[in-house]
Amino acid sequence: MKAITSMVSKRMNIKKYHRFLSNKVVGLLGILEDRNSSFRQGPAKAPKIIRQYFFEPAVNTWSELGIEVAERINDFGDFTPHSRNYDDICSSIEAEMDVLQRVHGLIPLTLGGDHSI
């Protein structure tokens, strides 16, 4: 009986999670920054390549919960931090994320950028 109760509660949580996600929209932002890469440069080139493959017709953009993910993405393009100071770079990226989250009410998702951000 305990196993059945656990399965039912998991299904209930999945339903709540599905309702939560079905109303949410993602704000996608590419971060063209890799000056602090420890080994190789390249993460700044990633946003363009990821978008190229993600929005390809052969890609399945449906989640396991039956949500069509691609139609819930608002792509805000790419952001290039112009400062050379690491703290300023992080602050400018945080400000962009804040705009996506607070002003537009979106879940921010970044592409690219090196591990330091």
Image (cartoon, rainbow, N blue to C red):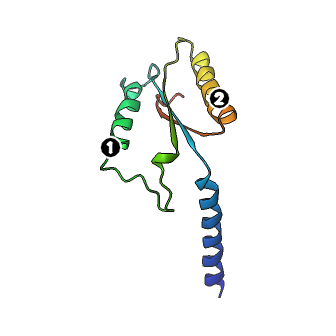
SS class, disc 2: helix
Q: CA distance from mark 1 to mark 2?
A: 28 Å
Q: Which residue is mark 1?
A: 56
Q: Where on the picture, by quarter, is residue 32? A: top left
Residue 39: give x, y in percent of width and height.
38, 26
For the residues bearing labels 1 and 2, Cβ distance under 8 angstroms: no
Instruction: Name the residue furthest bottom.
Output: 1
Question: Which residue is at 61% across, 30% downward?
Answer: 97
Q: Where on the picture, by quarter, is residue 19? A: bottom right
N-term-proximal mark, 1 vs 2: 1
Which quadrant of the rendered structure holds the C terminus?
top right
Q: Which is more toward the observer, 96 or 44? A: 96
Which quadrant of the rendered structure holds the N terminus?
bottom right
Is residue 34 toward the left or the right of residue 86 in the image?
Answer: left
Q: Which residue is mark 2?
A: 99
Residue 56: give x, y in percent of width and height.
32, 43
Question: Which residue is at 62% across, 71% downward?
Answer: 10
Around disc 2, counting alpha carbons within 10 Å, would you say few (fewer than 14), some (14 to 19), or many (20 or more)? some
